[in-house]
């Protein structure tokens, strides 16, 4: 059973990101503050849930959370600051948008940078341990999936509605055939080898 909070007696925001390992698209992150003593036995790490369950839980989270927000960092920004810094920046942007100021932050994973002067803790596999991080993982995942479906309508040959920008064989074959799009991350190894310079067309 997932725990309610890490910092007892404090208004705590859970944070998680989605899309860090993708070849294309923005990285998304969410921040969620749940009510004190909140319980929902269906909440879990988004990767452990079906797509239908994730979207159903998104509605519940948005209705029942004290506050929630989603932050986005674009492919251009990812290439400038690297994906780790971009993931943290997306979390900071989500925290910036919360309508309630958190007194503490808990983050999935083992890397974060201080947010203002608020205490924080990084928790490996936190999305499977704490409700607010699990809720954040669901929001980040579903909003990013919606975004990748929109991009798929623009570039259907890359199957982004199916792979969501992750490095599947079909995705890499499409990059070899059609080249890279403006949504691809130029600093990533798009072909799974060293041929980075071959997939970007002259501008």
Image (spheres, helix red, strand yellow):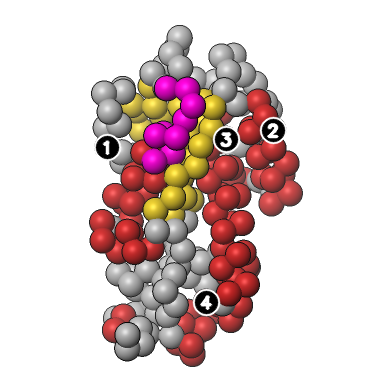
Q: Secondary structure at mark 2?
A: helix
Residue shown at the point (34%, 45%) measured from the top left = 89
Report if residue 94 lies within the magenta region.
yes
Q: Secondary structure at mark 1?
A: loop
Is disc 2 surrounded by few (<14), some (14 to 19) or many (20+) residues within 10 Å? some
Residue shown at the point (58%, 18%) measured from the top left = 35
Mark on residue 143? Answer: none
Instruction: Between residue 143 and residue 175, name the one nearer to us.
Output: 143
In the picture of the structure, the residue carrying the numbered disc 1 is 113
Residue shown at the point (58%, 42%) measured from the top left = 138
Q: Quadrant of residue 199?
A: bottom left
In the picture of the structure, the residue carrying the numbered disc 3 is 135
Instruction: Between residue 122 and residue 150, name the one nearer to us.
Output: 150
Where's residue 99, x and y in %?
Answer: 49, 27
Q: In the displayed structure, would residue 203 be above or below residue 98?
A: below
- Point out the tag, 3 or 2, that comes first from the N-terminus: 2
User: Which quarter shows the N terminus?
Assistant: top right
Q: CA distance from mark 1 to mark 3?
A: 21 Å
Is disc 3 surrounded by few (<14), some (14 to 19) or many (20+) residues within 10 Å? many
In the picture of the structure, the residue carrying the numbered disc 2 is 60
Mark on residue 171? Answer: 4
Q: Quadrant of residue 149?
A: bottom right
Q: CA distance from mark 3 to mark 2?
A: 10 Å
- Span shown in magenta: 93-101
Q: In the displayed structure, would residue 133 be above or below residue 162?
A: above
């Amino acid at each position: 059973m997932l725990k309610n909070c890490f910092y007892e007696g404090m208004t705590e925001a859970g944070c998680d990101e989605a899309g860090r390992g993708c070849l294309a698209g923005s990285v998304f992150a969410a921040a969620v503050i749940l009510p004190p003593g909140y319980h929902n036995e269906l909440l879990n790490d988004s990767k452990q849930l079906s797509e239908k369950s994730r979207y159903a839980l998104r509605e519940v989270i948005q209705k029942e959370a004290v506050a929630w927000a989603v932050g986005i960092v674009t492919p251009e920004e990812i290439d400038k600051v690297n994906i780790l810094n971009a993931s943290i920046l997306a979390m900071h942007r989500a925290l910036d948008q919360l309508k309630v100021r958190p007194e503490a932050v808990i983050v999935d994973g083992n890397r974060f940078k201080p947010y203002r002067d608020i205490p924080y803790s990084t928790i490996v596999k936190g999305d499977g341990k704490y409700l607010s991080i699990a809720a954040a993982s669901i929001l980040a995942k579903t909003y990013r999936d919606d975004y990748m479906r929109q991009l798929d309508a623009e570039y259907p040959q890359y199957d982004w509605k199916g792979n969501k920008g992750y490095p599947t064989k079909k995705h890499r074959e499409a990059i070899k055939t059609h080249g890279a799009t403006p949504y691809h991350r130029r600093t990533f190894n798009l072909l799974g080898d060293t041929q980075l310079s071959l997939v970007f067309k002259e501008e």
